[in-house]
Amino acid sequence: MMKKLGLVLMGLLMVLALAACGGNDDKEGQSTKDGAIELTLWTDWTEDRPENTLYKEVIAKFNEEHEDIQVKVEAIPHDQYETKLRTQAAGNQLPDMMRVWPGARTAPLAEGGAILPLNPIIENWDGVIPDSILQDYAVDGNYYAIPANVSITGVIYYHKDMLQAVGYDEFPKTYAELIELVKALNENGTTPISLGNKSIWPLQSVYISTIADRFTGSDFLKNTLNGDGTFEDPQFIGALSVIDELTKLEAFNEDLNTLDEAQSRNEFIKGNSAIHFAGSWAIGPILDSVEDIENIGVAPFPAFEGGNGDPARIAGVAGGGIAVSSKLSEEKQEAAFTFLKYYYGEDLYQGLIKANIIVPADVEMDDSIPQIFQVANSFVQGGLAPVYDATLTPELTDIINNGLQAITLSGKTPEELAKEMQKENESK
């Protein structure tokens, strides 16, 4: 009897405890941890990926170290995430904080007053993240998020021994020198550049995004889309002509339009070509697959004589960031700012580096980080050039993708492609 009574009393105590917890959850801004301010964060971190694990670990560490603030993560599958975000924003029902992406994906939230400018704390990253990268999250002079990572699309990978075999101890600094290297490799019986353009985006995203910026400068694309420029600009045609020239010089493998991007990377890894152009996504697979990683070098695309662009820039886009709802009380805003300053710090960026993910921050790296990663990561400090398929309309993206492939097949000239793009741009 006493045993049964004890079990009943224990059950009642558990119910009361659960009820108490539920009562705390109903109080806005409170958590179950001694009345701490609770901040809800929506993310799309549902996949089992190293970076997602790291993001959650940094937040867990923040919660452990801050008794007065607790961040509660709600993960939503990526395919549903942005739809839910837009729907909730329209109904003024956003969470306290939310994962966002740069440019046109954040601008509507900022312009609609749904998210809070981070200007009061932006100086926290002075000298750490270049302003040209922070600008990816800027709208009308206000900053709305800090990027965790950067995806760059214009990295050149090369086998050092293959270049040394034809007299090059380092990768060419100018396009004229690159042309001479291509000729030397062909004469030596070595395929110069491994390219897989079956999916038709690599020539645009990997090649033209950086090459065109070297010719035109980074304002060209925005100005042209706004009607203040033209795709028939001689500098842009000059950029398209680079693909034509490289093709005619037999810089690429013959099956460039039947191999996909991953297959062409594997051809490079196997040593069937001297050079491979790709983005930062290729670093991990190359590090994992190449036997002698010290034989792999990385370089930015060479400079072009007479170009209007900054040769230090590399095509890329800032990765996801965290925005703050504009509806928060002053107390919650301060808590959110405290969290962001902690979150976008050394632990996050060092953890991403160890996962072979390019970061926007200028942080020190120890000898455990492969040299090719350290060099590739340093490229972002020169600033980012716009990636074409992240900036163009879907219609213009289709035109340039198909047009570049047609150039490699001698089915279209650079001038014809530029004219076609301008006609579409004017039809909007």
Image: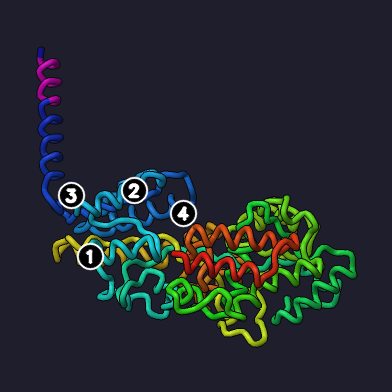
Question: Who comes first in sequence, dot 1 or dot 4?
Answer: 4
Choose the circle earlier in sequence order: 3 or 2.
Answer: 3
Residue denoted by label 4: 51
Residue at (47, 65) in percent of width and height: 427
Looking at the image, which residue is at 10% across and 26% down?
A: 12
Q: Comparing marks 1 and 4, which lies closer to the viewer?
A: 1
Q: CA distance from mark 4 to mark 2?
A: 23 Å
Residue 285 sits in which quadrant? bottom right
Query: Height in image: 422 above or below 307?
Result: above
Pointer 2 local density, CA inside 10 Å: few below 14, some 14–19, many at least 20: few
Query: Seen from this angle, which residue lies furthest top?
Result: 1
Look at the picture and state if 64 lies above or below 225.
above
- The residues colored magenta run 2-11
Q: Earlier in the sequence, mark 4 or mark 2?
A: 4
The secondary structure that dominates the magenta segment is helix
Q: Amino acid at mark 4?
A: Glu
Residue tagged by mark 1? 113
